[in-house]
Image (cartoon, rainbow, N blue to C red):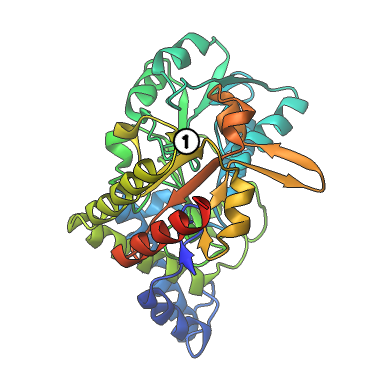
Amino acid sequence: MIYFDYNATTPIFPEVKEAMEPLLKERFGNPSCSYPLGREAKDALERAREEVATLIHARPQEIIFTSGGTEANNTVFKGILWALKEKGNHVITTAIEHPSILKPAQFMQKLGFEITFVSPTREGRIEPEKIKRAIRKDTILISVMHANNETGIIQPIAEAAQIAKKYNIIFHTDAAQSLGKIEVNVDALGVDLLTIAGHKLYAPKGIGALYIRENVPFLPLIHGAGQENGKRAGTENVAFIVGLGKACSILKQKLKNKENLKIARLRDKLWEGLKTNFEVIRHGASQYCLPNTIYVSFKKITAQHFLNVLPEICVSPGAACHSQKTTFSHVLKAMGISYEIAKGALRFSLGYFTTEEEIEKALNLMIKRLQN
C-alpha cells in the first residue's frame, strides 16, 4: 500500500500511542474526581490542553475538547449563532467549506438565519473583498476555512478576519487541514474561533478541539455536568485528549525544524512526474497551496479507472459513481470546473511518513498501468 491520502486521515505517531496507553490502563480515573486517581487524570488533561494551545499560540483556557472537527464546527454554527441572535441573523461563509460547515449552515437557514455562500476564484481562493461586499448590518458571524481539504489552497484568513474586526463581527476558521502542515497562530490570523481535528494531525479519530477567544459570546451545544469550563458537558475522553496533546507537541517541533519542507519537496517530485508522463491539469494556485497537497485532473483517465487499476495507491477522487449515480465535488463546481474535467480529478496528499521511495514506486506503477 502507498498512502497518499493524509488529508482524509493520518496514522498516529508512535509516541501518541505510547502517551495514551497509561490512561487506558492504570491511570483510568475520572478527571472530575478529587482522589489521587482522578487528580492524575485531571493533570494529564490540563497538560494536553497546554500542548494544544501552544501549537496555535493560544491560552489553555481558550481550548475546549470535542469529539472532532465536525462537533467543533457544529458548536460554532449553533452555539455562537444562538448566543448572538438578538444582534442579527446573517452569516457569511464560503461555497467550498467542508460539509461539517455547509450542513450546519443549511440547518440554521431552516431556523430563520440567513446565510451567504461566497464563491471562490477559479484558482480556489476566496477574495476578502467579496466577503466585505457580503457584510450587512445584521451579520454576526463569518466562517472561512484556513486551507481547503481538496485543493490544499490556503485562504487569506488574516485579511478576512481584519475586515470582520472592523465591522465587529465574530470570525471563525476551520483549521483542520492546516494544523501541523504550516504555522498557525490565532493572534496573527486574528480569528475568534478555530477548529481542530485530531485525526488530521496524527492523533486518533474521535477527538478534536475548539479554540474560543476569551469574551466571545457562546452557548454550549452539549449540556450536562459542566465540564470544559461549562462549554462542553460530558466526562472527558482523557486518553484521546492526551494523544491529541502529544501530537500537537510533536508537530510543533517538526514545524520548528522545517520538516514540512521535506514533504513539499516530495510533493513537487510527484507533480513533476505526473506532468512529465501524463496530460494533467492542476487545480488551485500552487503558490498558495499546503506543502503536502496536489489536486490534479487526468485529461484522458477517469478517477474511477485510476482507482480500479491502481488499488495499491490510496488517493481521493473528485468525482465518483455510486449505484449509477455520479457525485461531483462541490469544491470543483464552485471553482467553475466542468464535469468532464472533474471526472479525472484526484487528490494526492502526503505526510510525515511519506518517503521518496514511495513517490518513485507510485510513479512507476502509474506509468506501467495507465500508459498501456
| Quadrant in the picture for residue 191 | top left
Looking at the image, residue 321 sits to the left or right of residue 351; the answer is: right
Secondary structure beneath disc 1?
loop
Camera-side residue of 371 and 330 = 371
Residue at the location (38% across, 26% down)? 161
Camera-side residue of 282 and 74 = 282
For label 1, the crowd category at 10 Å Cα-Cα, with few meaning under 14, some 14 to 19 and many 20 or more, is many
**x, y (%) of residue 209?**
48, 54
Camera-side residue of 330 and 320 = 320
**x, y (%) of residue 61?**
39, 52
* Res. 111 in view: no
Relative to residue 90, is residue 324 depicted above or below? Answer: below
Camera-side residue of 131 and 271 = 271
* Res. 338 in view: yes
Looking at the image, residue 303 sits to the left or right of residue 263; the answer is: right
Residue with the most extreme right position: 323
| Quadrant in the picture for residue 233 | bottom right
- Residue on which the image places disc 1: 145
Relative to residue 285, is residue 202 depicted above or below? Answer: below
Residue with the most extreme left position: 257
Residue with the most extreme bottom position: 26
Residue at the location (36% across, 49% down)? 292
Relative to residue 174, is residue 34 depicted above or below? Answer: below
Residue at the location (42% across, 25% down)? 125
Q: How many marks?
A: 1
**x, y (%) of residue 177?**
44, 47
**x, y (%) of residue 164?**
42, 21
Residue at the location (65% across, 31% down)? 105
Residue type pointed to by label 1: Met
